[in-house]
Image (cartoon, rainbow, N blue to C red):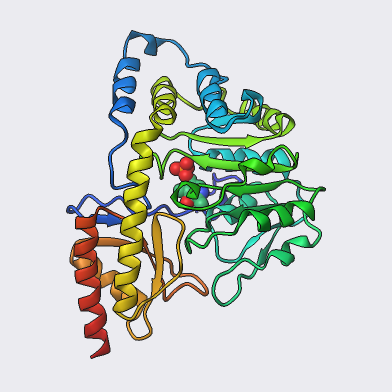
Amino acid sequence: MSRYWSQTTKRIKPYVPGEQPKDRTYIKLNTNENPYPPSPRVIEEICRAAGEDLRRYPDPCCEELRETIAAYYSLSPQQVFCGNGSDELLAFAFLAFFNPGAPILFPDVTYSFYPVYCTLFRLDYELVPLDMSFNVPVEKFFADNGGIVIANPNAPTGACLPRASIRQILEHNFGSVVIVDEAYIDFGGESAVELLEEFPNLLIVQTLSKSRSLAGLRVGFALGHPDLIEGLRRVKDSMNSYTLDRLALAGGVAALKDDEYYRETIRKVIATRERVAAELLKAGFSVIPSKANFLFITHPQARASELYAGLRERGVLVRYFNMPRIDNYLRVSIGTDQEMDIFLRCITELAAHAQG
Ligand SMILES: *Cc1c(COP(=O)(O)O)cnc(C)c1O
């Protein structure tokens, strides 16, 4: 603590990102990165953009990227907003649509950035407890609120709500903005995109970080009514007009245009996820059915904290959250088949050892 910190800096509790360690090479299953490289066309377009034009500012409106995303989802560019990763979009959205004094609702077990933004922006929030199996009790979101944030599929559980449940939440909340964070939607969930024309209070947030293998490029986008998009633009242009650089804009456009390539990598991730889930069940683990690129698992005898440490020693990194309700679970990102075979061998050995 420094005496020079502002009140805000003293008060906030920053988000802790998954480690990117450099002490040795790990099989990295801890940050939900995609194990497959981005489309070769993306790299080509980024290289093409890495030229003398870099002396010029990028397009602050992200016109071409917004048009490409709009065409992809059959929307108008006025319904699309682009950001430096979806984390930035979420921050803008919290500022643009939520007020202090009225509680923001989100599940008690969800993406841990949401409470961080609430504290940063002095917003109140209320945690809605998930049920014993980590399902979202939809009717708890029918209460009075100042806004709702739902990650769908949820993180770190991977559980996914059907579109009908998102619709129900929207129908009961015409008075506030409902943010649906679809960071993992491409791995098998039902997107809420088709609800946009009906609900002017729906904001969908997606990212190229997970399904498009571009976590390092920092491109996210939001879809919503033009009035919501205009709200995001007002906030952005009060902070930083150029959140996406020229390389990110070029790579983002190319990523959306090479759908065929990504369909194939997504198919591979899903197939590996289902195979690994079945193997873990056989080894005595409980596995939450996942529509994301990770699995959330627990074992009746082996402590998650010890499995985490044992895997780490063997060069396999997974995510362990020392938090209420989930401190005996591990979140395991889906890697290549080869990586997952090593993970499976290590974790089944560790679990068998814990059972004695
Ligand atoms: C990874 C993730 C994000 C952030 O993605 P970026 O676009 O890389 O900032 C947002 N929400 C959830 C639930 C995530 O897991």
Residue 90 percent location from the top left of the image: 59, 43
Residue 219 percent location from the top left of the image: 46, 34
- Residue closest to the eye, 34 or 240: 34
In the image, taking residue 298 as reference, residue 193 lies left or right, namely right
Residue 246 placement: quadrant: top left
Tell me if residue 231 comes above or below residue 211 in the rendering.
above
Residue 162 percent location from the top left of the image: 60, 57
| Residue depicted at x 51% and y 18% | 64
Residue 322 placement: quadrant: bottom left
User: Is residue 214 visible from the viewing direction of this image?
Assistant: no
In the image, taking residue 50 as reference, residue 146 lies left or right, namely right
- Residue closest to the eye, 253 or 238: 253
| Residue depicted at x 51% and y 63% | 159
Tell me if residue 327 comes above or below residue 246 in the rendering.
below
User: Is residue 328 visible from the viewing direction of this image?
Assistant: yes
> What residue occupies the far bottom of the structure in this picture?
356
Tell me if residue 28 comes above or below residue 75 in the rendering.
below
| Residue depicted at x 19% and y 63% | 342
The quarter of the rendered structure image containing the C terminus is bottom left
- Residue closest to the eye, 119 or 202: 202
